[in-house]
Image (tube, rainbow, N blue to C red):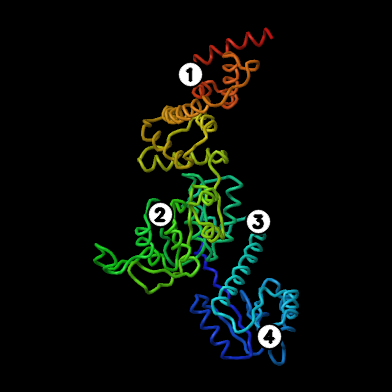
Amino acid sequence: MKAPRQARTPLPVLLVDDETQILKSYSIMLRSAGIKQVLTLDDSREVMPLLAKQEVAAIVLDLSMPKLPGIELLPEITANYPMVPVVILTAVNELETAVECMKAGAFDYMVKPVESSRLEASIRRAVDFHALRLEVLHLKEHLLMGELEDEDAFSSIITVNKRMRAIFQYVEVIAATHQPVLITGETGTGKELFAKAVHSISGKKGEFVAVNVAGLDDTMFSDTLFGHKKGAYTGAEEAREGLIAYAAGGTLFLDEIGDTNESSQVKLLRLLQEQKYYPLGSDVPKKSDVRIVVATNQDLQKLITEGKFRKDLYYRLRAHQIHIPPLRDRMEDIPVLLDYYLEEAAASMKKKKPTMPQELLTLMSTYHFPGNIRELQAMVYDAVARHKGGVLSMESFRDIIGQERQGAAAQARAAEETVPYGTRENFPTLRDAESALIDKAMKLANGNQGIAASLLGITRQALNKRLNRKSPEKKKR
């Protein structure tokens, strides 16, 4: 088994200015804002030698310096280290100089004195921009290799699907960053398993803490995540830490994020922007160093259109996005999943692993699995619980699938009441409709009459009679 991966150490920000007092004040400002890794140089001639041996996330460069002015150093930096964004600071407000700097590749240009909030925001954008460039570079390299560095991290996700393997590679690339991750997919696709994989690969030393935020009102949301002081509300007899504190240095997984209300969304947005939070009843902020991973089975874009989800929060959360395809889009996984859950279920019930009938795979291939892998797992466990010996019975699978199809058929009939079949001229006869349904069922069942009969909701004998009746008709034609 591989040793746990080390979390990627944040790259430092390099401050270059000939005034030591400015370097000191900017360093303090950045560290108080959560940017802990800061390097300073008061001699611009030392910049290129330092960059040759030390990687940095961004450079804040003063233009007016003796010996080697920033205006001369800038093109040298951008030519040799194009991945590193450079934020220019100058005391002279000249449009021509600003244009010249931007043409030379400057990321931003600001005139002194600069408000600390504006400088902090510019540096954060530069750091994020650098991280994005690195991520794209690493992703390209990873996809070209076509291999996983840490197979163990995905051991709980059973798949042979190429699309899923590509998602694994993407997870390996983005896991070591501190940016939020948005995981989307239908119910039962395994969103929490992917969140755990992100945490495992990240190398973060803190805990993985998961919470389902669906149904939490604003007070419960705040209390659960941020905690409270003693006496913050009636019944708060003791102070309590929130889940952010428990996940310190690790990952906080918020499931069903699409079900949060607007007040809770505002608080989460503030946490992501400022990396600070307030426990209930406290006016003293606490710092947060947790990695936020969220998941939802809802369409957040639709919720934004309906005014139920904040657009700014959405874009903050989807710094990295993982979409898990439904089981019906990766049918090649069904045989391996069936085998895995048969063994797991038999072991948990202290039974011998049943033999799987070949017809079961054909039956499963005709089903759309609205509950995805979780539904498949429940089916297998139910069948193994009923199993007494020999070949596994398909009865329980047929019962569950039949019930689901009856519900789907009822919905279809309700919809048909408002949808016309066509004009009088092309309206199908009952015999035509029956023939088309039988052909379709036999095609889906790969010629297996038993499975085709279950799709049609009739007995095998009844289907056989209809097939025999069709044969003479085909010969006459």
Amino acid at circle 2: Val
Element on which disc 2 rests? loop
Task: Quickly name the residue at label 4.
Answer: 92
Density class for disc 1 (Cα within 10 Å; few <14, some 14-19, many ≥20) is few
Looking at the image, is mark 1 or mark 2 nearer the viewer?
A: 2
In depth, the one of 223 and 249 nearer the eye is 223
Q: CA distance from mark 3 to mark 2?
A: 34 Å
Q: Are marks 1 and 3 in contact (CB under 8 Å)?
A: no
Q: Residue at x 68, y 89 (%)?
A: 65
Q: Are marks 1 and 4 in contact (CB under 8 Å)?
A: no
Label located before the other in sequence (3 or 4): 4
Amino acid at circle 1: Ile
Element on which disc 4 rests? loop
Q: CA distance from mark 3 to mark 4?
A: 46 Å
Q: CA distance from mark 1 to mark 2?
A: 44 Å
Label located before the other in sequence (3 or 2): 3
Q: Is residue 344 above or below residue 392?
A: below
Q: Give the quadrant of the C terminus.
A: top right
Task: Quickly name the residue at label 1.
Answer: 458
Q: CA distance from mark 1 to mark 3?
A: 49 Å
Task: Quickly name the residue at label 3.
Answer: 143
Q: Are marks 3 and 2 in contact (CB under 8 Å)?
A: no
Density class for disc 3 (Cα within 10 Å; few <14, some 14-19, many ≥20) is some
Where is residue 82 shown, x and y percent of the image? 71, 72
Label located before the other in sequence (1 or 4): 4
Amino acid at circle 4: Val
Q: Residue at x 49, y 38 (%)?
A: 370
Task: Quickly name the residue at label 2.
Answer: 213
Where is residue 76 shown, x and y percent of the image? 74, 80
Label located before the other in sequence (1 or 3): 3
Label located before the other in sequence (2 or 4): 4
Element on which disc 3 rests? helix
